[in-house]
C-alpha cells in the first residue's frame, strides 16, 4: 500500500475559502468522491470530495482554516483505484431504459406535437460511459440554471458543454463582457460631459490591452463562480459537443476528439443559438461577428455595423466611445425594431454625434476584402430609391441576428421534432414531443433572452419531477444597454394599434425629474400604457440612464394586474429616477403635481 496526499482541486476563482466542517477523521475508510470537508465563501457553501480511496492517516486542516486550490487536506493510505469516478459511488449505475409511462408526467399534453418520439428515433445498444437521471445539453444561463435546479431537487445531473467554461454565449462572449465594456464607455462619455458642468478632465488614454484584460477578468470571475456552484451541487460537467444517439443517450465529443456516451432518464436541451452569417461575406479578420467585436483586436478609424438591432448598437456605442467613427446599415425603416418608436427617436437624437451615416431601408449586397480595407456595396431596399455609394471600412461588424441550434444536435435521433428553422416546439412545461425530453431558451422561440431562458429552465427541471409548474409569464422585458438605455415591456403603442387594443397612456418627461436634471441627463421619459376599458397596465417604456434597472417594476405591475391608482399611490423615494414610474401613473390619472395641469376634457 502507498500513502498519497489529497489536495484541494480547482474550485474556481475563489481564494481563502473557510473550512466550516470536517466530514471525516483519522482512521476512517473513504471512497473516491466521498465528501471530506465543507467550505464556505461569500457566495455559497460546497463539499470538497476525495480523489482517492483508502484509510485516512492524517488530517492537515481544521475548522476555521482558509484554504485554496492545492492546499493539503489529508493523507490517505490507498486501498484501490484512485481515479475519480464518473458517477457518485453511493449511486450505483442503472442502465437507462426506454421511456415508460411511469417516467412520463401524468398529463404531458404537449401543445405543438404528438406526445411520443417521432418514427425516426434511433435505438442505441453500445457502451455507456456515464449514466444519470438528468442530462442538460448546453451550459448557458438557461442550461446551468436547469442543471443546478435539477441537482437541488435531488437529481443525479450531468451538464454537457462544448466550451471549457460554463456560462454559454451570454457570460463568455455576450451579455456580461459587453456590459463590462459598455460600463467603461459610459464612464468615458460621462467624464467628457462633466466639462459642460464645470469639471474638465484630460482626454482619456486608452490602453486597449489593459481594457481587454479587464473584460476577460470579469468573464473569469463569473465563470469561476459557476464552476464553484456546479461542484457544490455535485453536477458532473462533461466538456464536448453533444449529439443525440437515441431518446436516452447522447454522444459527447471532447476537445481532444475522445468520445463519451451519456445515458440519461430525462433531458433538458439548452443548446442555444448561433450568429447568422451572410453568404456573400468573406472570411477576413477585419470582418467580425459580436464575438469577434468583443475581442477588441483593434480600434478602427471607420467601422460599419450591418444590422441596426440591439447587439449592433451596443457594440457601436463601445467602439464610438473608444474613438471610432460609425456607419450603420439596416434593411428596415428604423433602428432597434420592437422598441417604442418615440424612445428610439430620443436615443437616436442623443447619439447623432456617434454616426456619420445611418442607412435605413438599405441592403448590404456586396462585401470585398481589399488590402486597403473592406469595401461594402449597398442597395436601396425600396424600388426607385437612390442607393448609397460603396464605402471602405477598417472594421465591419455583422450583427443581423441569431438562429437556433436545433439542427446541430441530431435531435431527430432522439425523436424530438425540430422545425426547418431549427426551433423545437414545447408545451407550457417546456416538454417536447418526447415526454421525458424538455427544451428551453433560444431553441424554443423568441425572444432570445437569457432571463427568459432561466425562468424556462426552472420550469423544465421542476416539471421533470412531475411538479405542477408552468411557464406562463405575461410579459418579458427587453433592454438595449446603450446610452441612454432603452427598456420596454408588454405592449408598445404600435403593437396595441396593430392588435386593435385601445390604450391610454401616462407620460412623464425626465426634464420634470429633479434627479434626471441634477444628473444632467434629462433627455429621457417614462411612458405607461393602460387598457382603456379596465385601466390595468399593459405596457411600459423607459428611455434614459439606468432604464434597464427600473423596467422590472413595470413588468411586476403588469403581472399583478395593477392599475394607475395602484402604481401612483405606491410611494417612490425622492429624488430618484424610479419615481418617474409613479409620476407617469399619476399623469395618467390626472393627479400629477410635477407637471402642468391636465387639459380639461
Image (spheres, helix red, strand yellow):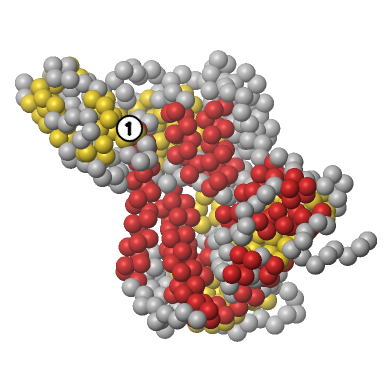
Compared with 308, 468 (above or below) is: above
Compared with 508, 23 (above or below) is: above
Quadrant in which the C terminus is drawn: bottom right
- Visible in this render: residue 25? yes
Compared with 359, 140 (above or below) is: above
Q: Is 595 left or right of 129, judged from the image as shown?
A: right
Q: Is 601 left or right of 401, judged from the image as shown?
A: right
Quadrant in which the N terminus is drawn: top left
**Mark 1: few, some, or many residues within 10 Å (few <14, many ≥20)?**
many
Q: Secondary structure at mark 1?
A: strand
For the point 21% across and 39% down, the residue is 67
For the point 43% across and 20% down, the residue is 96
Find residue 384 and report its horizontal and vertical position in percent: 75, 80
Find residue 216 and report its horizontal and vertical position in percent: 35, 58
In the picture, residue 524 is in which quadrant? Answer: bottom right
Compared with 130, 509 (above or below) is: below
Find residue 223 and report its horizontal and vertical position in percent: 37, 47
Q: Is 226 left or right of 503, judged from the image as shown?
A: left
Find residue 342 and report its horizontal and vertical position in percent: 72, 66
- Visible in this render: residue 393? no
Q: How many discs appear?
A: 1
For the point 66% across and 56% down, the residue is 579
For the point 37% across and 55% down, the residue is 218
Q: Which residue is mark 1?
A: 46
Amino acid at each position: 500500500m502507498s500513502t498519497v496526499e489529497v489536495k484541494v482541486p480547482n474550485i474556481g476563482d475563489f481564494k481563502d475559502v473557510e473550512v466550516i466542517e470536517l466530514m471525516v477523521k483519522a482512521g476512517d475508510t473513504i471512497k473516491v468522491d466521498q465528501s471530506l470537508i465543507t467550505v464556505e465563501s461569500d457566495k455559497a457553501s460546497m463539499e470538497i470530495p476525495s480523489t482517492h480511496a483508502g484509510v485516512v492517516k492524517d488530517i492537515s486542516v481544521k475548522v476555521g482554516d482558509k484554504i485554496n486550490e492545492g492546499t493539503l487536506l489529508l493523507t490517505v493510505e490507498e486501498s484501490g483505484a484512485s481515479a475519480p469516478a464518473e458517477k457518485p459511488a453511493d449511486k450505483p449505475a442503472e442502465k437507462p431504459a426506454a421511456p415508460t409511462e411511469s417516467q412520463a408526467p401524468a398529463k404531458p399534453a404537449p401543445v405543438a406535437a404528438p406526445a411520443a418520439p417521432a418514427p425516426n428515433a434511433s435505438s442505441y445498444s453500445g457502451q455507456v460511459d456515464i449514466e444519470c437521471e438528468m442530462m442538460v445539453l448546453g451550459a448557458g444561463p438557461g442550461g446551468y440554471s436547469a442543471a443546478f435546479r435539477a441537482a437541488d431537487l435531488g437529481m443525479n445531473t450531468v451538464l454537457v458543454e462544448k466550451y471549457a467554461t460554463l456560462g454559454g454565449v451570454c457570460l463568455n462572449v455576450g451579455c456580461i463582457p459587453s456590459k463590462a465594456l459598455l460600463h467603461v464607455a459610459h464612464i468615458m462619455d460621462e467624464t467628457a460631459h462633466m466639462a459642460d458642468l464645470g469639471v474638465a478632465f484630460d482626454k482619456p488614454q486608452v490602453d486597449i490591452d489593459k481594457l481587454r484584460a479587464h473584460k476577460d477578468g470579469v468573464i473569469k470571475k463569473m465563470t469561476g463562480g459557476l464552476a464553484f456552484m456546479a461542484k457544490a451541487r455535485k453536477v458532473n460537467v462533461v466538456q464536448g459537443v453533444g449529439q443525440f444517439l437515441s431518446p436516452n443517450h447522447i454522444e459527447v465529443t471532447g476537445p481532444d476528439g475522445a468520445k463519451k456516451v451519456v445515458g440519461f432518464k430525462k433531458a433538458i436541451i439548452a443548446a442555444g443559438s448561433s450568429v447568422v452569417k451572410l453568404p456573400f461575406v468573406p472570411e477576413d479578420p477585419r470582418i467580425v461577428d459580436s464575438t469577434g467585436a468583443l475581442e477588441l483586436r483593434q480600434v478602427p478609424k471607420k467601422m460599419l455595423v450591418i444590422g441596426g438591432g440591439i447587439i449592433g448598437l451596443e457594440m457601436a456605442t463601445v467602439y464610438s466611445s473608444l474613438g471610432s467613427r460609425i456607419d450603420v446599415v439596416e434593411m428596415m425603416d428604423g433602428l432597434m425594431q420592437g422598441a417604442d418608436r418615440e424612445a428610439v427617436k430620443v436615443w437616436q437624437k442623443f447619439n447623432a454625434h456617434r454616426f456619420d451615416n445611418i442607412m435605413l431601408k438599405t441592403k448590404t449586397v456586396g462585401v470585398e476584402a481589399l488590402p486597403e480595407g473592406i469595401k461594402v456595396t449597398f442597395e436601396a431596399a425600396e424600388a426607385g430609391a437612390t442607393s448609397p455609394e460603396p464605402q471602405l471600412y477598417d472594421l465591419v461588424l455583422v450583427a443581423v441576428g441569431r438562429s437556433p441550434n436545433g439542427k446541430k444536435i441530431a435531435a431527430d435521433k432522439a425523436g424530438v421534432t425540430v422545425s426547418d428553422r431549427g426551433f423545437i416546439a414545447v408545451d407550457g412545461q417546456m416538454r417536447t414531443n418526447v415526454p421525458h425530453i424538455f427544451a428551453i431558451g433560444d431553441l424554443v422561440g423568441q425572444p432570445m433572452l437569457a432571463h427568459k431562458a432561466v425562468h424556462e429552465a426552472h420550469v423544465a427541471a421542476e416539471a421533470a419531477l412531475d411538479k405542477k409548474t408552468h411557464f406562463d409569464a405575461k410579459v418579458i422585458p427587453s433592454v438595449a444597454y446603450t446610452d441612454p438605455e432603452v427598456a420596454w415591456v408588454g405592449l408598445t403603442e404600435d403593437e396595441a394599434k396593430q392588435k386593435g387594443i385601445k390604450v391610454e397612456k401616462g407620460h412623464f418627461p425626465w426634464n420634470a425629474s429633479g434627479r434626471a436634471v441634477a444628473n444632467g441627463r434629462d433627455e429621457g421619459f417614462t411612458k405607461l400604457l393602460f387598457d382603456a376599458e379596465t385601466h390595468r397596465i399593459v405596457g411600459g417604456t423607459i428611455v434614459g440612464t439606468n432604464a434597464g434597472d427600473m423596467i422590472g417594476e413595470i413588468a411586476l405591475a403588469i403581472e399583478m394586474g395593477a392599475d394607475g391608482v395602484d402604481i401612483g399611490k405606491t410611494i417612490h423615494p425622492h429624488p430618484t429616477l424610479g419615481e418617474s414610474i409613479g409620476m407617469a401613473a399619476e399623469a395618467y390619472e390626472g393627479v400629477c403635481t410635477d407637471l402642468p395641469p391636465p387639459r380639461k376634457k
